[in-house]
Image (cartoon, helix red, strand yellow):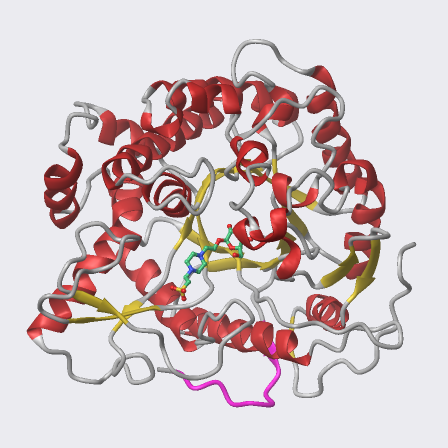
Amino acid sequence: TTVVAKGRTLRFPEGFVWGAATAAYQIEGAARQDGRGVSIWDTFSRTPGRVADGHTGDVACDHYNRHRDDVRLMRDLGLRAYRFSVAWPRVLPEGAGRVNEAGLAFYDRLVDDLLEAGIAPYATLYHWDLPQALEDAGGWTSRETAYRFAEYAEVVRDRLGDRVKTWLTVNEPWVAAVLGYGIGVHAPGRASAADAFRATHHMLLAHGLAARLLREAGAAEIAITLNLAPVLTPEGLHDPQAPVSAEDAEAVNRIDCLLNRQFLDPALRGEYPREVLEIVERIAGLGHVRDGDLKLIHQPVDLLGINYYTPCVVRARPGAPGSDSYPGSDGIEFSGATGPTTATGWPIVPTALTRLLTRLSRDYPEVGLLVTENGAAFEDVVAGGRVADADRIAFIEGHLRAAYAAIEEGADLRGYLVWSLLDNFEWAEGYHKRFGIVHVDFATQRRLPKDSALWYRDVIARNGLVKDRARRPTLEVVA
Ligand code: GBH
């Protein structure tokens, strides 16, 4: 293992992609504007008791009406890439059939503005805002939804494909399937372990169908984005050499299969892990997995998008009920790691990112790696026209050092996109959790780059990290 000496100048590889990420429902607002249809997140957030304090994405950051200013802000920060998602119900209000020209025109303008600002558009096709009409027809538990997704992907491809070179199909199918269909804390709020497995498979199918038709059109880079995390024992968390009992090793492997390999292996190898098939068969049956599906899911992809926040810590405990988030995890205890956490309570463990990236490059060597999300919520304070978010800077810097160490160890990491550009609608947490490097005053929609944004701008400018952190902000606030 290479220990990266603190204070050394760490220059990232030539052409390393620096950027930021967002998602449509979390920032766009304009929920009823220009013919946008209703998504499952509109329905869910407008249902009392589902989202903290009844917050909704109706207005959010009003990015739909302010995208020009937001692109200017990105340009001033020096971003090389911007990952956004396309809202399916803006493009196809009923999920299928009639195309809403105004919705497509919005993304058309956004892409043009980005290119004019020298920022590469990275388009995610699905970041959880399924059209309600499709949910009413069964949602992701229905195989048909995968085919509707392919039709939608084709419409977007045909409109933006001449300028968008990097495409991400589905974002975090684990979260969308498990939190949405398995335990119901996300839209559409259904709670059935069997449905979560069906939804997972259909989202993977959707990925494969979309990847194939993007390839046909000659897209330069195609990716799937997964929430991935090293699965570790409490002892192994900070000590990779710590001995692991056979029982703990089985627990680690089972959760690794459910969280990571259930997605990685079909997409990148064309097979489900045996351990996953056994669990799925027991809980949901395998009727939804048809001959030829895995071949369809296994499309050549150029990049693996990695959303990393925190590791997953488990140990074997006979008789433990397991976690509802991991159907089939009976006999396993999920323990919170000790040590510092972010405002969402997630332990901060940058070294786990090094382990994740080196493992992925070793086990899936054909695919390039891109961190498509990494970041943190903290209790930000605006004082004197400034947000001095030293904790967020330390978080990002720690993870960039960890990413650098992975590159030194041979991981094929191509870029890093911070989550998120703006404070935004943090799903079930509403607006309470602020992940942005740019502060948003939701009452006035004023944007204020936090110290982390100004620090990140300097990291991008020098393509690396140095000992002396950027000092005082110098960037003008975009009104
Ligand atoms: C992403 O989800 C989303 O893509 C994005 O839209 C969202 O805003 C962002 O992250 C921030 O939440 O076991 O308690 O330590 C990330 C989802 C985060 C789910 C980490 C699992 C583990 C929490 N994942 N989480 S814990």
**x%, y% of residue 84?**
63, 42
Tell which of 221 and 441 is nearer to you: 441
**x%, y% of residue 153?**
51, 24
Identify which residue is drawn at 19% across, 23% down: 290
Q: In the image, is residue 8 part of the stretch drawn in magenta?
A: yes
Label total for image: 0
Region of the chain picked out in magenta, as a range: 2-11
Classify residue 247 as left or right of residue 182.
Answer: left
For the C terminus, give its image quadrant.
bottom right
Residue extending farthest top: 97
Classify residue 430 as left or right of residue 462.
Answer: left
For the N terminus, give its image quadrant.
bottom left
On screen, 168 above or below 356?
Answer: above
Classify residue 282 as left or right of residue 206.
Answer: left
On screen, 454 above or below 57?
Answer: below
Task: Please tell me in which quadrant of the rendered image residue 67 appears.
Answer: top right
Residue extending farthest front: 48
Task: Please tell me in which quadrant of the rendered image residue 243 appears.
Answer: bottom left
Tell which of 247 and 425 is nearer to you: 425
Is residue 388 something that shows in the picture?
yes
**x%, y% of residue 263?**
30, 45
Tell which of 75 and 462 is nearer to you: 75
Magenta span main SS? loop
**x%, y% of residue 39?**
56, 29
On screen, 318 above or below 296?
Answer: below
Q: In the image, is residue 475 part of the stretch drawn in magenta?
A: no
Is residue 84 something that shows in the picture?
no
Task: Please tell me in which quadrant of the rendered image residue 405 appears.
Answer: bottom left
Identify which residue is drawn at 60% across, 9% down: 98
Identify which residue is drawn at 74% across, 41% down: 59
Classify residue 318 as left or right of residue 69.
Answer: left
Tell which of 463 and 439 is nearer to you: 439
